[in-house]
């Protein structure tokens, strides 16, 4: 083209060169225009997606902040509850310790009382035994002087087998019946055996 333009007038040549340059520029613009409109559409679409993502993220951040507040309030409530529980456990522990101490003291006191009562019972049994022996000795002395027999005092020697069985029966019942113990006087080493 430049070879053809060399034979053409320089003004026409300039005009032709300008027209060709304008044509090339126009073609380049036409090529760029769809690219720019496609890019613009893509950018708008990406911008919309980014706006939606931003809204979703803002919503999630708000939810997370709400959850964080709930967590903090629950944490405070749990800490308070644990403190109260700890106080109650401490009180219960003190009560249990006090109860154990009181129980040990009560058991020791009861054991002392039982020992004292057992000693007193042994002492009273000894007194009763001594009394019974004295009564029997007096009865034997009196019986040897008179023919009169007190039917409430066990004799040293039985006159017959029925009398012996009767006193054996009274003796076995007296172990469980206080009235019989009061009513009759028994020998400690009787000939019942």
Image (cartoon, rainbow, N blue to C red):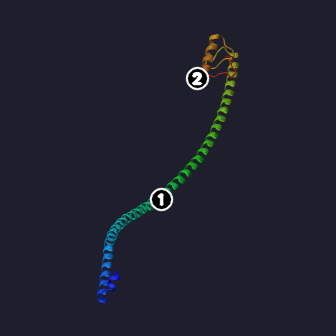
Quadrant location of the C terminus? top right
Per the rendering, the mark at residue 89 is none
Residue 23 pos. (x, y %): 30, 79
Question: Depth check: 130 or 41 in front?
Answer: 41
Mark pair 2, 1: CA separation: 71 Å
Is residue 80 rendered to the left or right of residue 165? left
Per the rendering, the mark at residue 80 is 1
Report if the CB atoms under discs 2 and 1 are less than 8 Å apart: no
Dot placed on the residue nearer the N-terminal end, 2 or 1? 1
| Residue identified by numbered label 2 | 180
Is residue 128 rendered to the left or right of residue 49? right
Residue 97 pos. (x, y %): 58, 49
| Above or below 193: residue 84 | below
Question: Depth check: 98 or 29 in front?
Answer: 29
| Above or below 106: residue 64 | below
Q: How crowded is mark 1: few (under 14 residues within 10 Å), some or many (20 or more)?
A: few
Question: Depth check: 51 or 157 in front?
Answer: 51
SS assignment at label 2: helix
Q: Residue at x 29, y 89 (%)?
A: 11
Q: Residue at x 61, y 42 (%)?
A: 107
Q: Which residue is drawn at 59% across and 46% down?
A: 100
Is residue 40 rendered to the left or right of residue 114? left
Residue 73 pos. (x, y %): 43, 61
Residue 134 pos. (x, y %): 69, 25
| Above or below 39: residue 84 | above
Quadrant location of the N terminus? bottom left
SS assignment at label 1: helix
């Amino acid at each position: 083209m430049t070879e053809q333009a060399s034979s053409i007038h320089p003004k026409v040549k300039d005009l032709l060169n300008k027209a060709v340059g304008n044509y090339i520029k126009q073609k380049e613009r036409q090529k760029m225009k769809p690219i720019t409109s496609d890019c613009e559409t893509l950018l708008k679409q990406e911008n919309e997606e980014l706006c939606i993502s931003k809204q979703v993220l803002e919503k999630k951040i708000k939810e997370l902040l709400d959850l964080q507040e709930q967590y903090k309030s629950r944490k405070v409530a749990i800490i308070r509850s644990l403190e109260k529980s700890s106080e109650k456990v401490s009180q219960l522990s003190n009560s249990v310790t006090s109860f154990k101490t009181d129980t040990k003291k009560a058991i020791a006191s009861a054991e002392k009382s039982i020992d004292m009562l057992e000693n007193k019972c042994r002492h009273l049994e000894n007194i009763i035994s001594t009394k019974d022996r004295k009564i029997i000795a007096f009865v034997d002395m009196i019986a040897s002087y008179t023919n009169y027999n007190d039917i409430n005092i066990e004799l040293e020697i039985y006159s017959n087998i029925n009398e012996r069985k009767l006193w054996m029966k009274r003796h076995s019942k007296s172990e469980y019946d206080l009235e019989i113990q009061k009513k009759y006087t028994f020998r400690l080493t009787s000939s019942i055996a």
